[in-house]
Image (tube, rainbow, N blue to C red):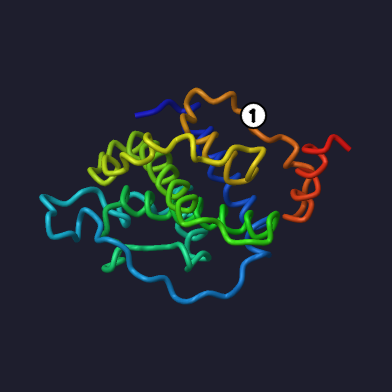
Amino acid sequence: MISAADTQTVHQLLGRIVYFHALFIEPALQPGPRPEPGPACCNHGSAAHGLRRAVDELLPDSAWAALGDVAATLPDHHRPCPSATGACCATCYIASASAAVAAGWAQAECRGYRRKDATETLLRVCGNAAAVRLGRVFAVQHETPCPTLNGFDEVLAMREALPGPEQLPLTGELLALWADPTVTTRQPVASWLNHCTGLDDVRRALDTRRTGT
């Protein structure tokens, strides 16, 4: 379990995801196909051994539910369990939604600043890092460990490939703040984002910071 103060921090960080998504990412999204199913969650996979705490038990009226709502707006990156019911493993659900958010943000930022798509490697490492970081916080908070979170060895091996706030500010800050929210300074990594109102503003701010003009 985490403390009440840490729970408040987690809720604030979840709120920041929702706010940044609505302000920066969603206006830049283009209509996409329905999400293709991803791997089965712990409660529906062929190797399932006993049911883990489910979506219907943990997410109603929870701040974490908003993460699934954000992921649902990113069909190019969202890979829910094929069964996709309230009986799904809640930790798997959060990990999958987190991966979609980070990959979707990275793609939107690359298109917005560089006018080109992100590489598959960048999308994968960002998604995997978010799945592990947010998934582990959720698992600790709700005392619901999940073996899915142990399957991302690439996250440690490719940590240097993750974008920083000076490369992809939204994605970089997301990953930095969730690396360990219980010891974070409680301050945004890229505080200047608070003065931007769209991806064009972020791009101009990045250009200014890089050139010093």
Residue sitting at the far right: 213
Q: At x 75% / y 48%, what residue is drawn?
A: 202
Q: At x 12% / y 50%, what residue is drawn?
A: 50
Q: Is residue 73 above or below residue 2?
A: below
Task: Locate the C terminus and report the quarter of the image it occupies.
Answer: top right
Badge 1 marks a residue whose secondary structure is loop
| Side (left or right) of 119 relative to 36 | right
Q: At x 31% / y 57%, what residue is drawn?
A: 56
The residue singled out by tag 1 in the image is: 187
Amino acid type at circle 1 is Gln
Residue 15 is situated, as x and y percent measured from the top left of the image, at: 58, 45
Q: Residues within 10 Å of mark 1 (few under 14, many from 20)?
A: few
Residue 79 is situated, as x and y percent measured from the top left of the image, at: 38, 63
Task: Locate the N terminus and report the quarter of the image it occupies.
Answer: top left
Residue 157 sits in which quadrant?
Answer: top left
Residue 120 is situated, as x and y percent measured from the top left of the image, at: 46, 57
Residue 150 sits in which quadrant?
Answer: top left
Residue 14 is situated, as x and y percent measured from the top left of the image, at: 53, 44
Q: How many marks?
A: 1
Q: At x 45% / y 58%, what residue is drawn?
A: 68
Foreground residue, 186 or 207?
207
Foreground residue, 159 or 32?
159
Foreground residue, 66 or 154?
154
